[in-house]
Amino acid sequence: MTIRQISTRPFPGQRPGTSGLRKKVKVFQQPHYLENFVQSIFDTQNDLAGGILALGGDGRFYNRSAIQTILRMAAAHGISKVIVGRGGILSTPAASCVIRKFRTQGGIILSASHNPGGPDDDFGIKFNVPNGGPAPEKVTEAIYRRSEEITSYRITESPDVDIDRLGTRNLQDMTVEVIDPVQDYTDLLAGLFDFELIRKLLHSGRFRMRFDAMHAVTGPYATHILETLLGAPSGTVINGTPRENFGGGHPDPNLAHATELLEMTRGQRGVDFGAASDGDGDRNMILGRDFFVTPSDSLAVLAANARLVPGYQAGIPGIARSMPTSQAADRVARQLGIDCYETPTGWKFFGNLLDAGKIAICGEESFGTGSHHVREKDGLWAVLFWLNLLAVKQQSVQQILMDHWRQFGRNFYTRHDYEGINSRIAGELIDDLRGQLPGLPGRELEGYTVEYADDFSYTDPVDGSVSDNQGLRIGFTDGSRIVFRLSGTGTEGATLRVYIEAFEPDPQRHLLQTASVLAPLAKVAEQLAGIEKRTGRAAPDVIT
Ligand code: G1P
Ligand code: ZN
């Protein structure tokens, strides 16, 4: 067989972040750029040689060409088999499912998640480990170190492999197995949820829903599961045909970007249930008629009602939420008498807790929810979980939330993002705030008394590893809280995120406007951080 050894050089800053390596397509198109990173994965993950690799992506521009490059490099590296989704497609949770089901030695997922796609937009690559989850820090560090010293990579000289036909073919000594990207994932979900009951709900004539795939990878998954298997009328899935540029949109399921769906849930004629997922299928947004469920509340509701769903009937051992996620889940855990873990931002911190059986359900405020069924957050899983609950409870989304708040109290919640600010100024803002923290406890600010103020540090209860400087927390005596942190995923300058949460036990006040309830705390945040004075921004760029 013809293997070529090609000289390369390190690319500065080729550091995988929390979500792998994410850059503009143009950066990835530079000669040797993708190859460099892939070779660094192969050079450091010793079990891959002679082993199995799962491979697929969200179908964005450059996906197909990257798949062919990776296949050629895998063949040159002595990988025995690559399992690839047809057309190069695997949603992120489906890739996690495939890695686990076929016990592969890892997987490569091509995606830049919710970032726009197309020749002038973003592409990404990440390596997932054999538990199906994102590589932990020690793995990404090793890949990074290797990418800095690499001088050559190996690749076969061979024609493109046909990835559009199911079945097995050879690329020199390596087997390429093209699988249906939807099947294994569907089987997994069918084992967790009561599909019969959901089918009845969708056929009752009293329930209408829409799922917005945002022209991204969940189109085929949602169409198969919701329309074909569960019998929802055709047209239930909107924007269901994946496009390489996501139709020019921003495939991020939130109130700012999923506006078409939002409109469909409005007014008397609005649908009963609306849901959306992002570019690679791991995020979700849940809407009722004229009603938005915050991701923090969604996590709390799913955890509180887990026993109503077949896959979680025996109860859950614990819950985990990322630190900035509202404390609604903590209140559920307390009442259920189970543990609630507060982890740093990023899905990878849930992996150890899930593997150790300490938790079964976890989530982040950034529209990510998931469970022990895979090791990624999972958009469609959350949607089916909600459908299962709606089918059991025979209540509206709003009614379920109102009941939940009556039982647990309501954590009003918002996130303010200041994007593309000067990195130096952002750093100073955080440093100055950090300096103020020791003086805050006991102080009264706009009627709220500070109970604690710290720079969040996490010690992993499973492996003892410590992650420092994970965001500044200011907690108040009534359970309200303000959190400041800098984004780890932004691509230009710095993004400051301010998370504001107020606890309200009184049901009479549960339908107040979030913005007005949180206004005094927003004022406190501004007083402490001086955001406008430092950045010149009078208001956040994005409010979620
Ligand atoms: C953001 C979200 C975080 C999520 C990550 C990857 O990270 O806040 O919850 O895990 O994207 O989807 P950030 O930009 O805040 O570092
Ligand atoms: Zn995503």
Image (cartoon, rainbow, N blue to C red):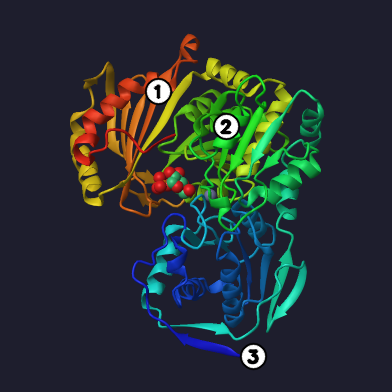
Q: Earlier in the sequence, mark 3 or mark 2?
A: 3
Residue 461 placed where, x, y %? 45, 45
Q: CA distance from mark 1 to mark 2?
A: 19 Å
Point out the frontmost of discs 3 and 1.
1
Q: Is residue 198 above or below residue 431?
A: above
| Residue in the picture at 68% in, 83% down | 173
Residue to which mark 2 is pinned: 262
Q: Which residue position is annotated with label 3?
A: 1
Q: Position of residue 58 (x, y in %)?
A: 59, 57
View extreme (front): residue: 248
Residue at mark 1? 515
Q: Is residue 509 above or below residue 131?
A: above
Q: Residue 505, relative to residue 351: is it above or below?
A: above
How far apart are labels 3 and 1 at the CA level?
A: 65 Å
Disc sitting over residue 142 in the figure? none
Q: Would residue 505 appear left or right of 155 to someone viewing this image?
A: left
User: Secondary structure under badge 1?
Assistant: helix
Tag 3–tag 1 contact (CB < 8 Å): no
* Image position of 182 with respect to 205: above or below: below
Residue 197 occupies quadrant: top right
Which kind of residue does numbered mark 3 sit on?
A: Met
